[in-house]
Image: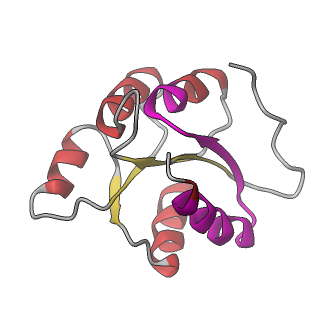
Amino acid sequence: MQKPDNLSPIATYRILVAEDEEANYKYVEKILKREGYDLLRATNGFEAVEYARLYDDIDLILMDIKMPVMNGVEATREIKMLKPAIPIIATTAFAIPGDREVFLNAGCDDYIPKPIKPGILIQLIDMHVKS
């Protein structure tokens, strides 16, 4: 896998968005670009793990749970073994009681259900990268 371009000179934080659905990614991209974040995109869990291996400047990962090749829970476990300090926020449409605990037990640092509310997303990201 080849690394995309380096961090934009105006961006202050780099976020890896692990999301296989194009429409979901475009929605998150619009929110985060407006806030000045630099983004990388992985379309499956395996790619997310590979990007975590390749990049030392990822500040946070938004991890979709239901993805092809390797799901978000497995990818989170792999990434946390490689780089335990990177905050990972689970994003998922699975919003039944107990899900949050499953994701946190897998190594996610936080959780946001879909559909994602922009204000809550920015609040969570700021809490994890600016603290």
Side (left or right) of 68 relative to 5: left
Q: Is residue 131 visible?
A: no
Side (left or right) of 15 relative to 80: right
Q: Residue furthest left?
A: 97
Residue 119 location (% of width, % of height):
50, 80
Q: Quadrant of the N terminus?
A: top right
Residue 47 painted magenta: yes
Residue 61 location (% of width, % of height):
51, 46
Residue at x-position 83% and y-position 37%? 6
Count numbered badges in the picture.
0
The correct choice, above or below, for 53 with respect to 102 in the image is: above
The correct choice, above or below, for 4 with respect to 14 in the image is: above
Side (left or right) of 33 relative to 93: right
Between 39 and 25, the one nearer to me in the picture:
25
Residue at x-position 65% and y-position 62%? 29
Between 3 and 35, the one nearer to me in the picture:
3
Residue at x-position 52% and y-position 62%? 125
Residue 67 location (% of width, % of height):
39, 40
Tell me where the magenta segment starts and ends, as one range.
23-49
Q: Is residue 27 visible?
A: yes
Dominant SS type (magenta): helix
Residue 82 location (% of width, % of height):
45, 21
